[in-house]
Amino acid sequence: MCGIFGIANQSDASQMTYLGLYALQHRGQESTGMSSSDGDQVYTHKSMGYVADVFSEDVIAKLKGINAIGHTRYSTAGDSNEGNAQPIVVKCTYGTVALVHNGNLINAVSLREGLEQQGAIFQSTSDSEVILHLLARSEGDSLLDALGETLAQVQGAFSLLLLTADSLIGVRDPNGFRPLNLGTVNGSYVLASETCAFDLIGATYLREVEPGEIVLIRGSELKSVKALMAPRLSKCIFEHVYFSRPDSIVFGRPVQTSRDLMGRILAQESPVDADLVVPIPDSGVSAAIGYSQQSGIPFAFGLIRNHYVGRTFIEPKIKIRHFGVKVKLNPVKDLLAGKRVVLIDDSIVRGTTSRKIVKMVRAAGAAEVHMRISCPPTLSPCFYGIDTPTKKELIASSHTVEEICKYVEADSLGYLSLPGLIRAVGGKSSEFCTACYTGQYPIDFVDAMPDAKAEDRQLDLWEASLKE
Ligand code: AMP
């Protein structure tokens, strides 16, 4: 997962981009970077770390110009290192081009192999670099033509921003896997993965960049081209379940509205006699409020999150993740003691975090612990930009709901149904990618994945966690 932000024709473009990236920090915490342009040159700064740490006032001042793009990275393809930080910047026949990418290309490995055989030298292991190689080799007369030619060759999930010396380009893949929004501020255009980035800079949300659309922004002019077609839409439903911020509009719908409904429908589908609805913060909060309001069971913050610790799952090094669970949450004993508690979270992946939390809530004195999950069981990994473990490691791929309940040591466990989830996100099932819940992938794989090595490593850890 990643967050992307771009702005054109704005005197303090890099300052605005810094703020936009700050609002998109939740989408990626490994590395961040920015490129700006002043009509003449492209300036870039990128590094491992958080937005607030990577960009100082001095750095921002050096990112001159009126156009800028930025990126917060969480790797789903390629290693976690500085070489894979974005923007990726190249010099080619179309001038200097900087690129940021949210998504995951499913044919990057085969495209890369083909390019390498033709002599291409890659600087990173990121799938996004393939796009720039194809662009540089294109015979299109203009950058826009070259981009159309390039994008016809890549498959998978891609919301992209490109920056040149004098223009900003936004692209959304034809399936519409990942979000990309268009806004306006001070007579300029702005693009961002989520609208929470617009709010922070006082921009107004205009619309989504449409699936398959390319928008070219130069000065205060915007040119739109519908360049790419796909047989079906595949908007990532998990953006509404977990990934996006509830204060964002994603795929044209407020995420909070979806999450509240997920909780309400969950309360209808999976009721329980209890004294208290407690969210697992922050991911379970919106759905828990919906569950509480629908069921009439009082809501309470029975678990307090230490906000200075990153989200447990977001660090790719597994050792850190386990550490994170322990330091992240603390039960409020006075609230929980003697109570029949409904714990609400958005999803169960491996089950390891949930198991620890259930134990913790019981140890705090809860009389009963019932888990309710605001999406269906996660059966299959995502290959379109969400970091999920391999299938083997997803507890629901090999265990029934009853078995998962036993593993997490809850008194009962209930998931939101898929029709319930579709209703909550206010769309038609044919518009969404629900592969993580159904195993039905909207586009076929070209490259073999996932790599066997990663599977072995994850399986060991999974077994280790079972022995705990
Ligand atoms: P576990 O109990 O180990 O399955 O972990 C479940 C927790 O992981 C839930 O609180 C989810 O909000 C969170 N989670 C689910 N998917 C992801 C993801 N792709 N990235 C980060 N966290 C996630």
Image: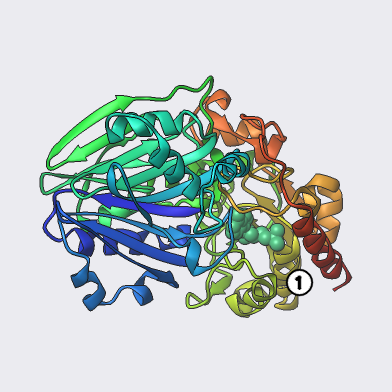
Extreme residue toward the top, this view: 231
**Residue ID at (14%, 51%):** 39
**Residue ID at (42%, 38%):** 137
- 383, above or below 223, in the image: below
**Residue ID at (73%, 70%):** 356
* Percent x, y of residue 61: 18, 71
* Percent x, y of residue 430: 56, 23
Foreground pick, 65 / 236: 65
- 327, above or below 30, in the image: below
Query: How many labels sit on residues?
Result: 1
* Percent x, y of residue 322: 69, 74
Extreme residue toward the front, this view: 119
Secondary structure of residue under mark 1: helix
In which quarter of the view is residue 37 placed? bottom left
Q: Quadrant of ligand 1?
A: bottom right
Q: Seen in the image, is 85 located left or right of residue 342?
A: left
Q: Seen in the image, is 147 located left or right of residue 289?
A: left
- State the quadrant of the C terminus: bottom right
Q: Is residue 400 visible?
A: no
Q: Which residue is mark 1?
A: 359
Q: Seen in the image, is 443 located left or right of residue 158?
A: right
Query: What colour scheme does the image use?
Result: rainbow
Foreground pick, 146 / 228: 146
Mark 1 belongs to which amino acid?
Lys
Cβ of disc 1 within 8 Å of ligand 1?
no
**Residue ID at (20%, 70%):** 62
* Percent x, y of residue 319: 69, 75
In which quarter of the view is residue 433 placed? top right
Q: Is residue 353 visible?
A: yes
- 293, above or below 43, in the image: above
Density class for disc 1 (Cα within 10 Å; few <14, some 14-19, many ≥20) is some
